[in-house]
Amino acid sequence: MKPEILLTAPVEPRLQADLEAVYRVHRLWEAADKPAFLAAIGKGVRGVVTRSVIGADEALMAALPGLEIIAVFGVGTDAVDLAAARDRAVRVANTPGVLTEDTADYGIGLLLALARRIVEGDRYVRAGKWPAGLLANSTRVHGKKLGIVGLGRIGSAVARRAQAFGMDIRYNGPRAKPVSAWTHVPDLAALAAQVDFLILTCPGGPQTAGIVNREVLAALGPEGMLVNIARASVIDEKALVTALETGAIKAAALDVFADEPNVPEALLAMDNVIVEPHIASTTVETRMAICDLVLANLAAHFAGRTPPGLVG
Ligand code: 8YV
């Protein structure tokens, strides 16, 4: 008998096919009446596969009394109720490591695009504005100061790349990481005041909710730029919109939003904002590696072994 799993949302078609070969897969997003669907199939489900922005809340776990493992497609576990999973002895596994380098490449890409007006330049040419005059000058990146919020795997990979641009790298996070050559600034507003660019690479969740607030944005200042490849929850969005509208900061590049795929109108209306559809890890290579690790996590669990991406 194939173990039963619940897929909360569409994932890579390859992963859906691979899952279906090994498991009996129930597709939650296709159910018109989700509570009725869960009531009908919930008892048999032993595993959940979910996207990191969708996660799994306590209500879902309660509807699946035989649940053993939640396998996250991605690295973020902020949308999984980890305490509820612990209480129910449900394992949580994610896909760390495989998306680090692509996400860091992309973060640096956004930083360059923002400072050097690359996206704006493209819009400028397509809109036929070039013959009427030059695009406004951009901002130099090399040799500038970069503040990294969260020096984990991805933050460190961003730092290594930024080093090649001769940047002065400082970081904020709960602990100094003495193995790194970079400067730890324990206070986020102090870090923002010191740097030209702030890039967010920390996990989401309650510990980082709203830490980039009005004070931090004011400290970043009218020439400062912000890149977010972490989670929207890290920024106080209202404060960000105001800071961008009033010139309290110069510009922002955002890959993540609170209510994806919906992006606030206020942000869409601003030329000094780059908006992206959460694509930091979406290279073919990384997506296939994420698929492999989701499958490996499930296979290990159902074979009685420890999933390689076990959280905690
Ligand atoms: C994924 C991410 O694209 O891994 C994460 O936590 O945010 C992204 O890399 C996305 O969440 C896939 O579900």
Image (cartoon, rainbow, N blue to C red):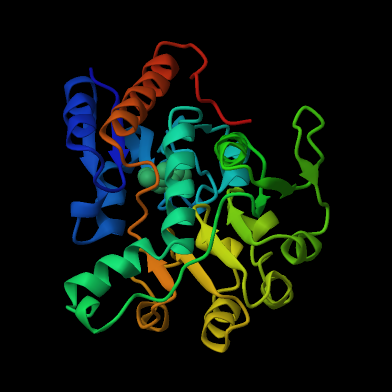
- Residue 265, by quadrant, is bottom left
- Residue located farthest toward the bottom when viewing the structure as drawn: 246
Q: Is residue 123 above or below residue 159?
A: below
Q: How many marks?
A: 0
At horizontal 24% and vertical 84% (from top left) the residue drawn is 132
Q: Is residue 6 left or right of residue 243?
A: left
At horizontal 52% and vertical 59% (from top left) the residue drawn is 227
- Residue 302, by quadrant, is top left
Residue 94: tell me if it is visible: no
Of the pair 74 and 270, the residue shown nearer to us = 270
Q: Is residue 72 above or below residue 213?
A: above
Q: Is residue 241 left or right of residue 41?
A: right
At horizontal 63% and vertical 42% (from top left) the residue drawn is 166
- Residue 36, by quadrant, is bottom left
Of the pair 17 and 1, the residue shown nearer to us = 17
At horizontal 70% and vertical 55% (from top left) the residue drawn is 207
Q: Is residue 5 above or below residue 202?
A: above
In what quadrant of the picture does the N terminus appear? top left
In what quadrant of the picture does the C terminus appear? top right
Q: Position of residue 82 (x, y in %)?
A: 59, 43
Of the pair 277 and 141, the residue shown nearer to us = 141
Q: Position of residue 298 (x, y in %)?
A: 38, 23
Q: Position of residue 168 (x, y in %)?
A: 70, 47
Q: Position of residue 240 (x, y in %)?
A: 56, 76
Residue 112: tell me if it is visible: yes
Q: Is residue 60 left or right of residue 8?
A: right
Q: Which quadrant contains ligand 1? A: top left
